[in-house]
């Protein structure tokens, strides 16, 4: 099994991308699946239709396979990063365990020290991947949890790890965020730039051949073309036909925000951020984009989405 990590900020279309990538018969992934502590577990729905998601037959099969290999794995208390068992249901501990602030701490440690310190975590994840390989015709795990620390730690045991880095126009991101939560706008924008700069660092860390930058805008405009590019990057056979033919919901097991982003419909209207964000917000994002060199080649395309 090859590990492919999706890195993306929230509200950037990651659930949609996970569903599309995992529609490939050789890919399995679960989307943003580690958030039971923040949800009512009975309300979560798996793309395959299982509700609550813990009744999904593929998830149950994986739990059972892991138990036979000695790992006491349960989707409800699973965590993307290391955590003491007694803290698995403790909200604050769970949030703390996933902080990107740990990334430089672990990056400073040699692999031998990581393996010694986190032996239970690595054992659990090795047996997780082994269980996935035995569950279907899967060659690739598409990890949709978006946690930088998980990627940093797992590349020690899966050195061939690849990254798909998904970004959405930061103007559209700020607009999506403000619609759902009230927070200071500069803080939101700074969070976007901080996360995506750390994600982009993996181009250097893993090598450019193991890093692919994609945009939400191209995903919604020409999904087949982008998906084939992602499949080529992952080393998977390409597919015939259209996205509509590829999506067999019964065989996809993603959990994420109940997305209304249906491919091909997203860009039908003029982006709302163009009229809804104020001049100060637009100017601040423009300044941050100007300071962020790696965005320059792709930004004009993302910003030029026009109504049909
Ligand atoms: Zn399912």
Image (spheres, helix red, strand yellow):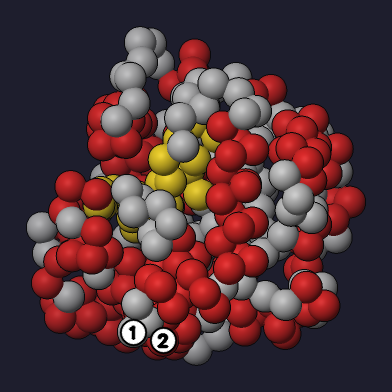
Is 79 located above or below residue 235 in the figure?
below
**Residue 63: quarter of image:** top right
Q: Report helix, strand or loop for mark 1.
A: loop
Pointer 2: what residue? 105
Q: Which mark is residue 6?
A: none
Q: Is residue 266 left or right of residue 132?
A: left
Q: Is residue 40 visible?
A: yes
Task: Please tell me in which quadrant of the rendered image residue 223 appears.
Answer: top left
Q: What residue do we see at 32% from left, 19% from top?
A: 238
- Which residue occupies the foreground of this view, 47 or 69? 69
Q: Residue at x 74, y 53 (%)?
A: 71
Say whether residue 161 is left or right of residue 211. right
Q: Residue at x 79, y 30 (%)?
A: 57
- Determine if residue 148 is in view: no
**Circles 2 and 1: CB atoms closer than 8 Å:** yes
The picture places residue 163, in percent across and down from the top left corner, at: 34, 52
The Cα–Cα distance between marks 2 and 1, rounded to whole angstroms, is 6 Å
Q: Secondary structure at mark 2?
A: helix
* Mark 1 lies on residue: 108
**Side (left or right) of 219 relative to 65:** left
Badge 2 local density, few (<14 within 10 Å), some, or many (20+)? few
Q: Is residue 204 left or right of residue 166?
A: left
Extreme top residue here? Answer: 240
Residue 155 image point, x, y percent: 39, 59
Up-down relation of residue 75 to residue 46 (above or below): below
Q: Position of residue 59 (x, y in %)?
A: 74, 38
Location of the C terminus by quadrant is top left
């Amino acid at each position: 099994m090859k590990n492919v990590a999706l890195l993306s900020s929230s509200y950037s279309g990651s659930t949609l991308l996970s569903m599309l990538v995992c529609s490939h018969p050789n890919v399995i992934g679960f989307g943003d699946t580690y958030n039971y502590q923040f949800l009512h577990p009975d309300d979560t729905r798996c793309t395959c239709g299982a509700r609550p998601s813990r009744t999904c037959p593929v998830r149950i099969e994986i739990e059972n396979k892991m138990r036979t290999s000695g790992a006491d794995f349960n989707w409800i208390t699973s965590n993307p990063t290391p955590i003491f068992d007694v803290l698995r249901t403790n909200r604050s501990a769970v949030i703390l365990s996933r902080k990107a602030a740990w990334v430089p701490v672990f990056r400073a440690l040699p692999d031998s020290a990581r393996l010694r310190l986190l032996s239970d975590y690595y054992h659990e994840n090795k047996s997780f991947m082994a269980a996935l390989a035995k569950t279907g015709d899967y060659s690739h795990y598409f990890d949709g949890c978006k946690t930088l620390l998980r990627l940093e730690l797992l590349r020690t045991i899966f050195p061939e790890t690849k990254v798909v880095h998904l970004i959405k126009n930061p103007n559209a991101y700020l607009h999506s965020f403000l619609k759902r939560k009230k927070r200071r706008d500069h803080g939101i924008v700074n969070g976007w730039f901080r996360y995506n700069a750390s994600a982009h660092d993996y181009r250097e860390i893993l090598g450019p051949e193991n890093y692919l930058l994609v945009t939400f805008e191209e995903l919604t405009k020409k999904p087949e073309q982008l998906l084939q590019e992602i499949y080529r990057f992952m080393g998977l056979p390409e597919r015939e036909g259209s996205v509509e033919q590829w999506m067999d919901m019964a065989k996809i097991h993603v959990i994420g925000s109940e997305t209304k982003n249906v491919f091909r419909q997203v860009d039908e209207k003029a982006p709302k951020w163009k009229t809804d964000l104020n001049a100060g917000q637009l100017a601040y994002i423009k300044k941050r984009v100007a300071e962020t060199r790696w965005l320059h080649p792709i930004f004009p395309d993302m910003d030029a989405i026009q109504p049909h």
